[in-house]
Amino acid sequence: MTYEGDFRPHRVAVLALDGLLPFELGIPHRIFGRPRDAQRRHLYEVVTCSVRPPGRVDTDADFALHVPHGPQALATADTVIIPASYELGPVYEEGRLTDELAIALSHVRPGTRLASICTGSYVLAAAGYLDGRPATTHWADAERFQRMFPKVEVDANVLFIDDGDVLTSAGVAAGIDLCLHMVRRDFGSAVANEVARITVVPPHRDGGQAQYVQRPVPDPQLATTATARAWALGRLHEPIQLRDMAAQEAMSVRTFTRRFREEAGISPGQWLTQQRVERARQLLESTGLSMDQVARESGFGTAQSMRQHLQAALGVTPTAYRRTFRTGTTTERPGRTGGLGDNTGTGTPR
């Protein structure tokens, strides 16, 4: 991929390990391969590399892949992503890198953003990248992961965690959420939403949403809360009471709250706050409305209330957020997120 002038796409290197899950390997290519700027230039360049010279990499399916790049490609990356593998060997069994994998990771430049999908987190942990940091992995592996890597602050109750320059996600579909989050963090909600629309996936699931819900698929014989959610989204700028949402489904507040949590994994109040934060982000990125106007339009009422909620959710003030995506000049960027009600990081790389 060649461009004239100073423009250079953000380079994403995906590390393909033997035993990888093809679906998860494809997530970064699908999400990062779509964003373009106003001149239709790709905002990302995605390359796949192996720990060995270019050649065959086995998968957990009945086919293998030919990977065109060796580990040297990691040295050229702005972001390195490690999808899950079922053949991690000593990494999974003993918590240590193989010599081959250690040599490959030595190519990664200091300051490179690192991310894992599902049990790709074992590789980051075995390499020491997660020591003293919050991280997540697939809920079924979380207890074992914590025992093996006691220095890691494991949170099994979230879809993904953004700790600035190191990000981890739960299993499979949470990798899509993480990649969309990185696009949103890099280029704003409008770009991420367009990618989500083309990919036909939800544009935003907050990292703090529970990754495992006891009944993720509602009983088809029971009413859902979809109508109430659509009703609320159309009037985020207005005061919305729980009883008003329940009334849209002709349910009692108690039944509605229980059904809502079963479907969404979070409470109606948490969901409303998430949607209002997302609305505020879009307005800050795409309009010149004053802070008071953005606060009113997104349903926070006052600029002070909006500031508190965005600071908690994104780790930055509304002013800093707008400056990031409207001028690209701020050094304060949306950073550490994830954890139910614990989005308090600053996003400053360690």
Image (tube, rainbow, N blue to C red):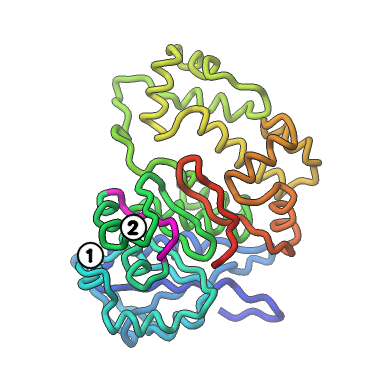
Residue 334 placement, left or right of 15: right
Residue at 41% over, 83% down: 106
Residue 221 placement, left or right of 114: left
In this view, the residue in front, 11 or 304, is: 304
Q: Check disc 2 and give the amino acid type.
A: Cys
Q: Can residue 63 be seen?
A: no
Q: Residues within 10 Å of mark 2 (few under 14, many from 20)?
A: many
In this view, the residue in front, 277 or 55, is: 277
Q: Is residue 199 magenta?
A: no
Q: Residues within 10 Å of mark 1 (few under 14, many from 20)?
A: some
Q: Can residue 244 be seen?
A: yes
| Chief secondary structure of the magenta portion | loop
> Which residue is denoted by mark 2 in the rendering?
118
Q: Position of residue 337 (x, y in %)?
A: 52, 51
Q: Position of residue 334 (x, y in %)?
A: 61, 55
Residue 237 occupies which quadrant of the picture?
top right
Question: What secondary structure is found at the residue carrying circle 1?
Answer: loop
Residue at 46% over, 68% down: 114
Q: Position of residue 95 (x, y in %)?
A: 26, 69
Residue 95 placement, left or right of 197: left
> Which residue is denoted by mark 1 in the rendering?
86
Which residues are the magenta region? 130-139
First in sequence: mark 1 vs mark 2: 1
In this view, the residue in front, 91 or 146, is: 146
Residue 294 occupies which quadrant of the picture?
top right
Q: Check disc 1 and give the amino acid type.
A: Tyr
Q: Position of residue 182 (x, y in %)?
A: 53, 58
Is mark 1 in CB contact (under 8 Å) with mark 2? no
Residue at 41% over, 48% down: 159
Question: What secondary structure is found at the residue carrying circle 2?
Answer: helix
